[in-house]
Amino acid sequence: MSRDIARREEYSEREEPTCPHCRIRMEPAILTVHFPRDHIPGRGYRCLKCGYEALSAGEADRLSDLAKKLGLYEPAMPMVRKITRSGKRLSLYIPKDIEETLNLKKGMKVKISVQGDRIVIEP
Ligand SMILES: [Zn+2]
């Protein structure tokens, strides 16, 4: 019985999803899936028009399990950054790794707070 279910899931994963933005069929693609410590490739779909990417639920679960086994959810080693000044205010550049891991975009709002002697920035 479980074999039948597995086969059916494979079949539904083969059906190409539609881009929610462009309403066109997405093409199968190898996607780069980011975790705090590293990234791993996964089978998914990409919209050739806008670049929107999607993973099937099954593949997302598989990658999540793999990332747990590999310890990719552990926080990466802290990176040292220098505080700079922009006009009258202090500023800090966000490392590219963190930008990609959290899918940060220009103009996105974040919450910044102090916890003890730490500065916490939350997307
Ligand atoms: Zn699209």
Image (spheres, rainbow, N blue to C red):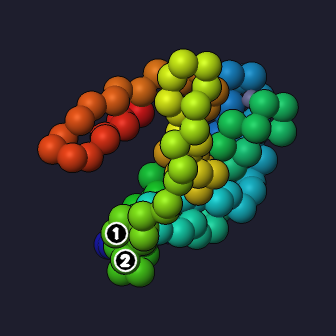
Circle 1 is placed at which residue position? 74
Q: Which mark is residue 88?
A: none
Residue positioned 41% across, 81% down in the render: 70
Cα–Cα gap, marks 2 and 1: 6 Å
Percent of width and height locating residue 54: 60, 45
Q: Is residue 121 left or right of residue 95?
A: left
Q: Callout 2, which amino acid?
A: Gly
* Secondary structure beneath label 2: loop
Percent of width and height locating residue 104: 56, 37
Percent of width and height locating residue 105: 61, 31
Q: Is residue 52 above or below residue 46?
A: above
Q: Is residue 46 left or right of residue 85?
A: right
Crowd around label 2: few <14 · some 14–19 · many ≥20 (10 Å): some
Q: Is residue 98 above or below residue 113?
A: below
Examine the image and state in which quarter residue 49 appears. top right
Q: Is residue 107 visible?
A: yes
Residue positioned 63% across, 51% down in the render: 96
* Secondary structure beneath label 1: loop
Q: Callout 1, which amino acid?
A: Glu
Image quadrant in which the C terminus is located: top left
Q: Is residue 13 visible?
A: no
Circle 2 is placed at which residue position? 71
Ligand 1 shown in quarter: top right
Residue closest to the far bottom: 70
Residue positioned 67% across, 58% down in the render: 31
Q: Is residue 94 left or right of residue 74?
A: right
Q: Nearer the viewer, residue 34 or 7?
A: 34
Residue positioned 37% across, 37% down in the render: 121
Crowd around label 1: few <14 · some 14–19 · many ≥20 (10 Å): few
Dot 2 and dot 1 residues touching (CB under 8 Å): yes
